[in-house]
Amino acid sequence: MDSNVIWSNEKKIERTIEALKKNNMNGYYVKDRYNLIELIKDIVDEGSIVSCGGSMTLFETGVIDHLRSGRYDFLDRYKDGITREEITNIFRQAFLSDAYFVSSNAVTENGELYNVDGTGNRVAAMLYGPDKVIVICGSNKIVKDVDEAIKRNREKSAPINAKRLDRKTPCAKVGYCMDCSSPERICNEYTLIRRQNVSDRIHVIFLNENIGY
Ligand code: SF4
């Protein structure tokens, strides 16, 4: 990445971290994946019960591998051969976990987390349940405000995810949201976390990279 772009992104990350603090959420900037994992070790105690929402960012950053390392009791929704029933059980057990790992469809410079879910398990756990929520984001997820967050989801996150999941939706063909009525629609629960009531519950960690959708 061009050094001037890196600088610009760093400024954006700094502004967003300050705004998150005002909304009672912790923000962090880590330089690389090694420091990301070290920070996670600081925030989440060894032996904790951990779970995660659906996220390509967690795979790309090596966080899923870290959760599988044996350091934690990981409720692994991605394990080989898992049945639909087992996944549903993990979704429910996740509410009782010590730490829940996710990314966010967008984070605004006002310190807000915007997310759209298909089944609601991810956003539900972000809102309530797990003692800690660890949100990992590339700088590409930062947007100016809620309007931009909605736009980002309609033009990027949702169509790309629909394509990845091979959904029979119009966005998976044309590449942008057409507010479909498809039975395979992936956009059902729209959430905005403007503030967190419980201190030290939500931790948002940024890397200065393009990661995930
Ligand atoms: S509402 Fe339908 S068309 Fe729009 S992004 Fe979601 S799945 Fe795609």
Image: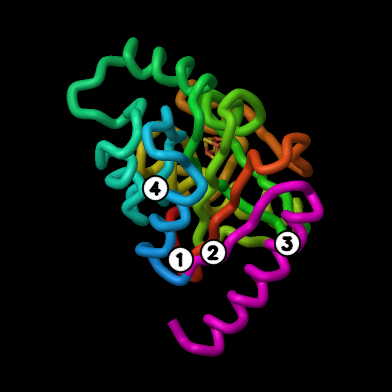
- How far is disc 3 from disc 2 in space, using C-alphas? 12 Å
Q: Which residue is mark 2?
A: 140
User: In the image, residue 198 lies at what x, y percent?
Assistant: 73, 35
Q: Is residue 136 above or below residue 12?
A: above
Q: Amino acid at mark 3?
A: Glu
- How far is disc 1 from disc 2 in space, using C-alphas? 5 Å
Disc 3 to disc 1: CB gap under 8 Å:
no
Residue farthest toward the right in the current orientation of the protein: 22
194 or 179, nearer to the observer? 194
Viewed as shown, does residue 14 lie left or right of 177?
A: right
Reading the chain from its start, which is encountered first: label 1 or label 2? 2
Disc 1 to disc 2: CB gap under 8 Å:
yes
Tell me the crowding category of disc 2: few under 14, some 14 to 19, or many 20 or more residues within 10 angstroms, Cα based.
some
Q: Which residue is mark 3?
A: 109
Tell me the crowding category of disc 4: few under 14, some 14 to 19, or many 20 or more residues within 10 angstroms, Cα based.
many
Q: Amino acid at mark 2?
A: Asn
Q: Which residue is mark 1?
A: 210
Viewed as shown, does residue 165 lie left or right of 177?
A: left
Quadrant location of residue 85?
top left
Q: Is residue 133 magenta?
A: no
- How far is disc 4 from disc 2 in space, using C-alphas? 15 Å
Name the element at disc 3. loop
Q: Which residue is mark 4?
A: 58
User: In the image, residue 108 lies at what x, y percent?
Assistant: 70, 56
Residue drawn at (53%, 81%), measured in percent from left and top?
6
Magenta segment range? 1-30
Tell me the crowding category of disc 3: few under 14, some 14 to 19, or many 20 or more residues within 10 angstroms, Cα based.
many
- How far is disc 4 from disc 1 in space, using C-alphas? 13 Å
205 or 81, nearer to the observer? 205
